[in-house]
Amino acid sequence: MTIFKQTRLSNGINLFVHPTDKFKTVLVQLIFHRQLAEDDVTECSLLPAVLQRGSNSYPTRQQLAHKLEELYGSELTADVSKKGERLFVVFNLNLVHDQYLPDENELLRKAMTILKDAINNPVMEGEGFKAEYVAQEKEQHEKVIKGLINDKIAYSVERCLQEMCKDEPFGVFKYGDVEKLRQIDNKSLYSFYRNFLEVSPVDLHIIGDVEPEKVNALVEEVLQFDRGDEMSIPDTVIKTESGEVKYISEKLDVNQSKLVLGYRTGLTYADDDYFALLMYNGILGGFPHSKLFQNVREKASLAYYAYSRLEKHKGLMLISAGIEGKQYKQTLEIIEKQVEDMREGDFGQEEFNNTQIGLRNQFLVEEDSPALVINRALDGMLSRRVEDTGKLLERLAAVTREDVIRIAENVKLDTVYFLSNKGAEQA
């Protein structure tokens, strides 16, 4: 795995350079950190779209796109994501390494200048962003928020998490709220943006065949904008007790019902036992050979899909299945039977070995993607576990059957969410 070199720039940006000759491209990610909170998540998630509309140097989307195309098809994108109770506003700059281009040795500088311009020199109108841009992006953003309901798998998972973490920051939807969105105008968003730039902790990751010293000097020169005292972002709160199980039912116009079970594991990527939890999740529902896939989907023919996944920074596990509404009770019983079997150690050595091989391959494949390399580094820094692939594979190989059975005792059901058709009988 690429080992990164860390530097703190004079304006407080944390620079991480990942030098590697494995890729013919250079990926730049500028990551702003925020606490996930209802108060400002809508502004945070709207900002990237507005800032991508153009800058003083390239004041329209078309001019900006044309300039990026001139830089050998460089791409600038932005979005938001969340890890635990932390929100990230991420700007991605993807470009070809100029060693593969004739008569070009300043491509990174030119591209970084465009990124800095987009971040720090937006198109203005009076004391705010250009009103037309903000109005248009609000309209698109409202469609994004409302559009979640069109993806019923993602919608059901999000609704389960919202109910499960109703009184926790993790329950906040990363794209915000329509009512809050409608209150935003070009001036209020610009005021938020100025404070956002000053106080948000910022990481800059650059991965490619680059020299760290030259990159440090370049970034120190180019990526300058006003910064103040960074805000402090608290650690994600990990709850271990689930209390009484919550059963949530919702009806919409759906052809296929969705069943989502939310569990609290008490373990995150920061814990040594996380690798036993990885194995647990893989055996239970992470692969085609897993218990959920084989017993719920294949043998009982109850589900169109059935899988489990972890929220590694919040200590949660989700089981999701697409089913016929009338088979809710039977499916729930079989799923709970698989979870109980894991506590009893009722899984074979072949399942264990195949899961270990599958997870090993996932770790190795991550090295083939610049974005996944950065993502793992970010996971490591958040969890204070910055380890290379070799160390991660060692931890994985050290997990025993007894470890998996031991951590299975801590996996507690918290919430059951069921989405069914309006016309169907209540399960």
Image (spheres, rainbow, N blue to C red):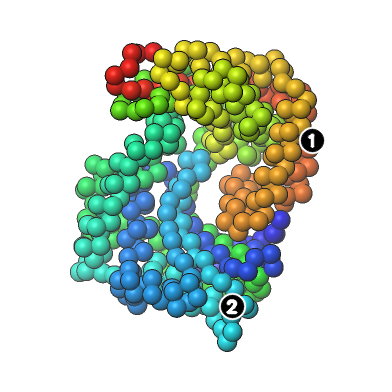
Inspect the image, locate mark 1, and give the three-letter code of the amino acid beneath it: Ala
Residue drawn 44% across the image and 65% down it: 76
Residue drawn 29% across the image and 46% down it: 143
Inspect the image, locate mark 2, and give the three-letter code of the amino acid beneath it: Asp
Relative vertical location of residue 356 with respect to residue 262 in this rendering, above or below = below
Quadrant placement of the C terminus: top left
Secondary structure at badge 1 equals: loop
Residue drawn 44% across the image and 74% down it: 69
Q: Earlier in the sequence, mark 2 or mark 1?
A: 2
> How many residues crowd around disc 2 within 10 Å: few (fewer than 14), some, or many (20 or more)?
some
Mark 2 vs mark 1: give the one in front: 2
Q: Is residue 114 left or right of residue 285?
A: left
Relative vertical location of residue 156 with respect to residue 348 in this rendering, above or below = below
Q: Is residue 239 visible?
A: no
Secondary structure at badge 2 equals: helix
Hey, which quadrant is residue 37 in on the image? top left
Q: Which residue is mark 1?
A: 398
Q: Is residue 389 left or right of residue 82?
A: right
Q: Is residue 356 visible?
A: yes
Q: How many marks?
A: 2
Q: Which residue is mark 2?
A: 98
> How many residues crowd around disc 1 within 10 Å: few (fewer than 14), some, or many (20 or more)?
few
Q: Nearer the viewer, residue 417 or 70?
A: 70
Quadrant placement of the N terminus: bottom right
Hey, which quadrant is residue 284 in on the image? top right
Relative vertical location of residue 279 with respect to residue 384 in this rendering, above or below = above
Q: Position of residue 217 (x, y in %)?
A: 58, 76
Relative vertical location of residue 401 with respect to residue 78 in this rendering, above or below = above
Q: Is residue 169 left or right of residue 138?
A: right
